[in-house]
C-alpha cells in the first residue's frame, strides 16, 4: 500500500489541462475561462437614470421660492434618446435606465415631484449627480472583466452580456464514463429478488460527476464477466477522458477490474492506499489512439465510492478542467467526541460541522462503515485522522475537508 499523500500526488501529477474551445457565453455557466477579456465599451455606455423621474439641471431646484416650476419638454422611455440640450428652467420625464439628456445633471424621483399644466413642481433642492448613473461607473472601457482560471457563474455571464461579449474561450470539460460492476445489482423500482440489491452507485456517481463540472457521457451496469468488462472498458476508453469503475478492485474471485485494465493495455499507477475506507482504490493511465485516458477503480461500497470521489476524482476533474483551486478545501476543527481507530491507515471520518465563536467543531457520525449510506446524507465534512494515531480525545484539533456533494 502507498500513503494517502503519495496517492494524491500521483493522481494530480497526471492531471493536465485537456484543451480549449470557444462557446457562446450563455452556455458557459460552470466552465473555466481560458482567456483574459477586457471590455470594449464602458458599462453603462451612457449616463442614465437610476429612477423613474424628471431629468433637470440641479441649479434650477435651488430657487429661493420653492416649489420650483420647470417646463416639461418631453417623456423619454428607456431605449429612446432625447437629442436636444436641456436648458435652464426645463425638464424631461425619464424612465429608469433611460439616457439623461445633455445639460441635465440630476433626476427627481416621480414621488418627489408633481406635474401640473405642463410643468414639474419641485419642492426641494437636488445635488448634482443625484439619481444619475455615470457612463462607465460599473466597468471602464478596456477594464479586465474575466481572467484565465475563473469558474464562470451567473454574475460573470451577466457581466459578459452587459459588455457585449458573445463568445468566450474556455477549457474543455473532461468526458467521463461510469461502469458499475456486480451480478447482484438490479434497477431501483424493480422487484427485489433473493440475493439482489438495488444499484445505488450508478445514481451516486451520476450526481457526483455532474456536480464536478465534467461531461457525463454514459453510465452502464456490467456483469462480473471478464469479456463483457473488457468490451465495455475498451468502448469507454475510446470515447472519454476518464473512466470510473465501481466494484471489482479487491482480491475476490469476481474482482476483475485489475485484470481487465491490464488486458486493455492500461498502466497501473497504484493499487491499494493506506486509508479507510477505499483501501483497494486503483488508478491507471491508458492510451486511446493518440489520446491519454485514465481509469479510477473505485471500491464497491457507496461510502467508499463517495469518499474516494471527493478526495481523488473531483480534484482530478477540476485540474483537467483548468481550475487552479482543485484541492479540497481544508479547515481546522475540534473534535466534540473521542475517536478510536487501528494504527496503519489514515481514516476519513464522517462529521457534522458547527461554527461556534469563530471556531469550527466537528461531531463524528454514529455509523462510519463504508456500506452505510444514511449518515452520508448528514455529513458536512471528512475529518482526516492520521495513520499513526489510534486514539484522539475530545478537544483534539483535526484537519477537515468540507464535502462538495
Image (tube, rainbow, N blue to C red):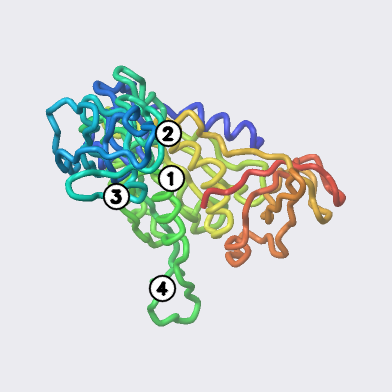
Q: Is residue 65 left or right of residue 22?
A: right
Q: Select label 3 or label 1 by which is in front.
A: 3
Callout 3: helix, strand or loop? strand
The image shows residue 81 at horizontal and vertical percentages of 14, 34
Q: What residue is pinned by disc 4? A: 188
Cα distance in 3D space between marks 4 and 3? 67 Å
Contact between labelled residues 4 and 1, with CB atoms less than 8 Å apart: no
Task: Give the residue furthest to the front.
Answer: 65
Quarter of the N terminus within the rendering? top right
User: Toward which corner of the image does residue 180 lie, by quadrant?
Assistant: bottom left
Q: Residue at x 72, y 64 (%)?
A: 366
Callout 2: helix, strand or loop? strand
- Residue 375 drawn above or below residue 277: below
Query: Mark 2 or 3 closer to N-term?
Result: 3
Count of residue discs: 4
Cα distance in 3D space between marks 3 and 1? 56 Å
Q: What residue is pinned by disc 3? A: 114
The image shows residue 400 at horizontal and vertical percentages of 68, 44
Q: What residue is pinned by disc 1? A: 212
- Near mark 1 (Cα within 10 A), the count class, few <14, some 14-19 or many ≥20, is many
Q: Is residue 337 left or right of residue 181?
A: right
Query: Mark 4 or 2 closer to N-term?
Result: 4
Q: Select label 4 or label 2 by which is in front.
A: 4
Q: Residue at x 43, y 38 (%)?
A: 317
Q: What residue is pinned by disc 2? A: 285
Query: Mark 1 or 4 closer to N-term?
Result: 4
Amino acid at each position: 500500500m502507498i500513503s494517502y499523500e503519495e496517492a494524491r500526488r500521483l493522481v494530480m501529477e497526471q492531471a493536465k489541462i485537456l484543451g480549449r474551445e470557444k462557446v457562446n457565453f450563455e452556455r458557459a455557466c460552470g466552465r473555466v475561462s481560458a482567456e483574459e477579456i477586457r471590455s470594449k465599451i464602458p458599462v453603462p455606455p451612457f449616463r442614465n437614470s437610476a429612477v423613474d423621474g424628471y431629468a433637470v439641471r440641479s441649479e434650477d431646484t435651488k430657487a429661493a421660492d420653492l416649489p420650483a416650476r420647470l417646463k416639461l419638454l418631453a417623456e423619454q422611455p428607456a431605449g429612446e434618446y432625447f437629442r436636444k440640450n436641456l436648458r435652464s428652467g426645463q425638464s424631461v420625464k425619464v424612465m429608469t435606465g433611460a439616457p439623461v439628456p445633455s445639460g441635465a445633471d440630476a433626476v427627481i424621483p416621480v414621488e418627489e415631484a408633481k406635474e401640473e399644466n405642463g410643468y414639474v413642481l419641485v419642492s426641494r433642492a437636488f445635488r448634482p449627480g443625484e439619481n444619475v448613473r455615470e457612463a462607465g461607473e460599473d466597468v471602464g472601457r478596456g477594464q479586465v472583466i474575466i481572467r484565465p482560471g475563473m469558474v464562470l457563474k451567473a454574475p460573470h455571464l451577466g457581466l459578459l452580456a452587459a459588455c457585449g461579449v458573445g463568445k468566450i474561450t474556455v477549457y474543455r470539460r473532461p468526458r467521463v464514463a461510469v461502469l458499475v460492476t456486480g451480478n447482484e445489482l438490479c434497477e431501483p423500482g424493480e422487484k427485489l429478488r433473493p440475493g439482489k440489491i438495488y444499484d445505488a452507485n450508478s445514481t451516486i456517481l451520476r450526481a457526483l460527476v455532474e456536480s464536478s463540472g465534467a461531461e457525463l457521457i454514459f453510465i452502464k451496469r456490467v456483469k462480473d464477466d471478464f469479456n463483457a468488462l473488457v468490451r465495455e472498458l475498451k468502448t469507454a476508453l475510446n470515447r472519454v477522458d476518464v473512466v470510473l469503475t465501481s466494484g471489482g478492485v479487491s482480491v475476490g474471485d469476481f474482482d476483475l477490474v485489475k485484470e481487465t485494465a491490464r488486458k486493455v493495455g492500461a498502466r497501473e499507477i497504484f493499487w491499494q492506499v493506506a486509508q479507510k475506507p477505499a483501501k483497494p482504490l486503483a488508478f491507471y493511465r491508458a492510451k486511446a489512439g493518440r489520446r491519454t485516458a485514465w481509469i479510477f477503480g473505485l471500491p464497491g461500497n457507496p461510502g467508499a465510492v463517495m469518499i474516494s470521489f471527493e478526495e481523488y476524482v473531483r480534484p482530478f476533474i477540476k485540474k483537467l478542467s483548468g481550475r487552479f483551486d482543485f484541492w479540497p478545501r481544508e479547515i481546522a476543527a475540534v473534535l466534540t467526541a473521542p475517536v478510536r481507530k487501528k494504527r496503519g491507515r489514515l481514516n476519513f471520518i464522517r462529521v457534522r460541522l458547527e461554527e461556534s465563536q469563530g471556531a469550527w467543531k466537528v461531531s463524528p457520525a454514529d455509523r462510519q462503515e463504508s456500506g452505510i449510506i444514511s449518515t452520508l446524507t448528514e455529513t458536512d465534512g471528512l475529518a482526516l485522522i492520521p495513520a499513526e494515531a489510534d486514539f484522539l480525545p475530545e478537544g483534539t484539533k483535526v484537519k477537515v475537508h468540507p464535502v462538495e456533494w
